[in-house]
Image (cartoon, rainbow, N blue to C red):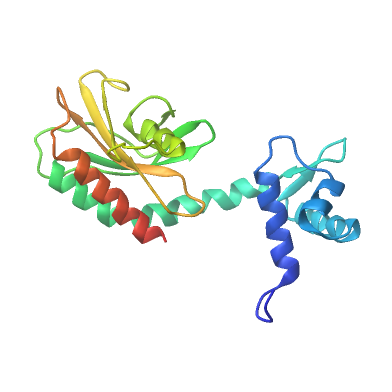
Amino acid sequence: MTAETSQTLDRGLRVLKLLADTDHGLTVTELSNKLGVNRTVVYRLLATLEQHALVRRDLGGRARVGLGVLRLGRQVHPLVREAALPALRSLAEDIGATAHLTLVDGADALAVAVVEPTWTDYHVAYRAGFRHALDRGAAGRAILTARQKTVDHPGYTLTQGELEAGACGAAAPLVGVSGVEGSVGVVMLADAVPERVGPRVLDAAREVADALR
């Protein structure tokens, strides 16, 4: 730790990260071992985080992430949406299809930003707040593919009719953005995704990722 940083805050954040990475919670002893500090320090950290509802302890004494984290998380979406809108507008106008930014929300893919083209006679209606399973639709499948780090993959995912009959989609994952797991994509009414759409979506995903770093 340098003189300009807070050791206590750093430890508190490390506690939250450790708890976020487990489904069953951690005991004081387990946290003490992982942090390399004594149990008294861990008790104080947990007590402070509990006061802010960022941590809760069950009847067995295991610490878990608290509901206060959800309130903080809800404030992230507007910031991410604002950063992504320029790239989404450019994508929607260029392709003539509805562009969207989708983030992981539990086991679902959640559309947090949507931009519809201004010049087309018709396009797919897609609204912010729409959610679907990660294994259906281009947006979710692109995220799952990124998790697998598939070799020799073009970097984007194409689907046909998985969420709506007669609609097809293309999406590319956000790469290299700490703390954000999502994708950028388009949905259109067509028999198949035109050849140029995949690479264009991939470029847009890179633009959004750059804006979020």
State the image coordinates of residue 161 (x, y, percent, origin top left). Answer: 26, 20
State the image coordinates of residue 188 (x, y, percent, origin top left). Answer: 19, 31
Please identify the quarter of the rendering in which residue 47 is found.
bottom right
Please identify the quarter of the rendering in which residue 191 is found.
top left
**If the image is split into quadrants, where does the N terminus sit?**
bottom right
Q: Residue at x 26, y 50 (%)?
A: 204
Above or below, comparing residue 153 to residue 38 in the picture: above
Q: Residue at x 14, y 42 (%)?
A: 95
Q: Horizontally, is 212 left or right of 52 in the view?
A: left
**If the image is split into quadrants, where does the C terminus sit?**
bottom left
Please identify the quarter of the rendering in which residue 128 is found.
top left
Q: Horizontally, is 41 left or right of 205 in the view?
A: right
Identity of the residue furthest to the bottom in this view: 3
Q: Horizontally, is 141 left or right of 4 in the view?
A: left
- Regarding residue 14, the answer to whether it shows in the image is yes
Identity of the residue furthest to the top in this view: 165
Q: Looking at this view, is 157 or 136 the one in front?
A: 157
How many callouts does the rendering have? 0
Q: Horizontally, is 100 left or right of 47 in the view?
A: left
Q: Looking at this view, is 94 or 10 the one in front?
A: 10
State the image coordinates of residue 211 (x, y, percent, origin top left). Answer: 35, 60
Q: Looking at this view, is 209 or 146 the one in front?
A: 146
- Regarding residue 97, the answer to whether it shows in the image is no
